[in-house]
Amino acid sequence: MKIEYTLIKEEKETGARLGKIKTNYGTYDTPMFMPVGTRGTVKSLSPEELKEAGSGIVLANTYHLWLRPGEDIVAHCGGLHKFMNYDGPILTDSGGYQVFSLAKNKKKDITEEGVHFKSHIDGKKLLLTPEKSIEIQNKLDSDIAMSFDECPPASATHEYLKNSLERTIRWAERGKKVHNNPNQALFGIVQGGPYEDLRRYSAEETVKLDFDGYSIGGVANDDESKEDMYKAIEYSTPYLPKDKVRYLMGVGEPVDILEGVERGVDIFDCVLPTRIARHGQAFTRNGKINLNNAKFKEDLKPVEEGCDCYCCKNYSRAYVRHLITVGETFGGRLLSIHNIRFLIRLTEEIRESIKEDRFLDYKKDFMENYQKSKQL
Amino acid sequence: MKIEYTLIKEEKETGARLGKIKTNYGTYDTPMFMPVGTRGTVKSLSPEELKEAGSGIVLANTYHLWLRPGEDIVAHCGGLHKFMNYDGPILTDSGGYQVFSLAKNKKKDITEEGVHFKSHIDGKKLLLTPEKSIEIQNKLDSDIAMSFDECPPASATHEYLKNSLERTIRWAERGKKVHNNPNQALFGIVQGGPYEDLRRYSAEETVKLDFDGYSIGGVANDDESKEDMYKAIEYSTPYLPKDKVRYLMGVGEPVDILEGVERGVDIFDCVLPTRIARHGQAFTRNGKINLNNAKFKEDLKPVEEGCDCYCCKNYSRAYVRHLITVGETFGGRLLSIHNIRFLIRLTEEIRESIKEDRFLDYKKDFMENYQKSKQL
């Protein structure tokens, strides 16, 4: 079967939704945060550690797996679940974003057919088309596949975005036609930058194609574009069907998860928790902390007091700081566990607050604490 | 209490011994392989993974922990066990070997007082003395401490070695005098290169000082010096008391473990299983294999068929190869688990064979398989 989404509750005051996704690998609650396993592994972590942190769906990258080891090898190994030994649900992106962000020298040639570009690994000429993206994802055998879309830069004009999203809609239709994995859901992606008319148009036209769920793409993640990100969500969700799940792509700052939930988003993903972990940074209720800081040298407290993760239950800041400063990978592993658990715990608390009709209060409290002593 | 060693059985045909070490952190059987956790962590692994692999004593490096984070910080954190969250026994080396192998530009000035050298990290001038080494180890609060010794190069002359080991004996005596951790055993170290007279002299004089156990040091590990290594063991063990445990420092090639056991060694340690893992290499019954090799690309078999480790129970060679070739640390982690389990399983089988008076048969079978298809 494909995934089934059930909307359990929508807050009256806000767009915050409580839901359930039934998959072939268990049923999970939304709002949800998905850890990112780019190359078929969430950096440095085992599937058991992901489960222990409360992970539901995990994301893997089509572009990276297409290049190495290749979708045929993954299929030969029994599909992504078996390949990476993850018996929870897996979502694959379309490769679209990576083609635009990772192509060698960032050069690419966008045609109606697809995108011509050079591999970031060996410079080999490649062509990714909507059909090819779906074909790869069918073979990877993820539970949720994404339509192939163009991800225009934040600087793109209204005119550029309009042409681009019209092509993205045609690409979505082409991808849907060749999609043939009966156990895999296929999502459409809403584009349109920060423009209300474009987001609405993109959402309505994409919904007409009738996908199993909808993603909101093309939101920039840097600090300067936060308002544009929130607008892009606000301008998209009202035109999405209530009975389908909504996924905001590439967003995972705690504050953005809260803003996304308020605007009706169900699923988030981001490389942030593992990336900042490798650099010694940890999320806490009081903002991010940097374990490289000498003040943690003799600190016997856990990375975050009150946290129930494996790192915080067993290790001191002094030990984690030691590992990070001497370059031991176990340090990044411990902080990755903590940071992933932090975001998952955030979504657990968000769900509780929606259940009890106090999401905005929860958000206000969280933001006050988190920003009060923000250190980054 | 300090460790207590009990000799259970000594094979008649060989010097192979079966024994037990009682520690404050459990009782463990010998012959035993100790994984190496240089900086208070066995690279990329959790304490739980070490336990699951069957680890008993784990080794940590005094030199590295002295430099970073410093023994006072480890003591402030409750000692090494608490610091690194390992509730099994821990052995610390003396720092002697590292001073000789890691000192900046390998320059050092050996005096009667100790060794003057420069830190390999920041070039800072340092002095390590027998007293300082013991003082650091007392604070680290390991279960077994090593006496500070000189590790002369393999090229050292008989005359040099004689002077050196006489100083090492004086250093051992000085270290023993200041040792004051009632829960920590202290081992003496036998030196003397490949010379029978020197090894005998060193062993007899060191035993006169009455240590809790004895190490055999100064054995070179390269392929050209294997015969010298075996001689060094043969010339040492006959002069060591039967009721004390014997530890061959820095040796962990499967073949060398077998040769060591045959000559009466109880404990081994080596960085090899984790180091080769990071480079994609795995021990198997049929010799080492290199997962970088393209022939493993579609190989659905586990790294080693019949192995009971977490890696082999859950992942294919194709997946591990993928992780290694794209540079994902989870690949090195999986192979580290396998390689450590491989050496521990080897010692388990060695113990069984001694129990059943068939050690030499076991050794012969193992060597035939292991060397037949040796790939490195």
Image (spheres, coloured by chain):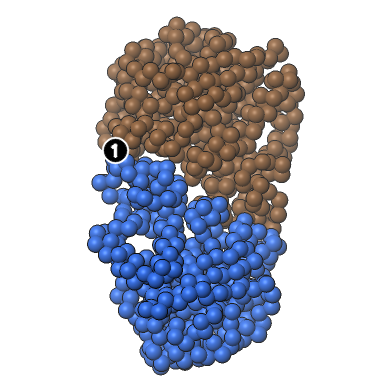
Chain colours: A brown, B blue
Say which residue appears at 60% left-offset and 74% top-offset. B4
Residue A370, placed above or below residue B235: above
Residue B148, placed above or below residue B124: below
Q: Say which of B374 and B358 sits in front.
A: B358
Residue B35 visible in the shown view? yes
Identified by mark 1, the residue type is: Gly
Q: In this view, does B219 lie to the left or right of A237?
A: left
Residue B24, placed above or below residue A299: below
Say which residue appears at 46% left-offset and 35% top-offset. A86
Q: Say which of A105 and B152 sits in front.
A: B152
What is the quadrant of the N terminus of chain A in the image?
Answer: top left
Quadrant housing residue B210? bottom right
Q: Where is residue B62 in the image (x, y as percent from the top left)?
A: 57, 70
The residue where tag 1 is placed is A123
The outermost residue toward the front is B356
Q: Where is residue B15 in the image (x, y as percent from the top left)?
A: 41, 78
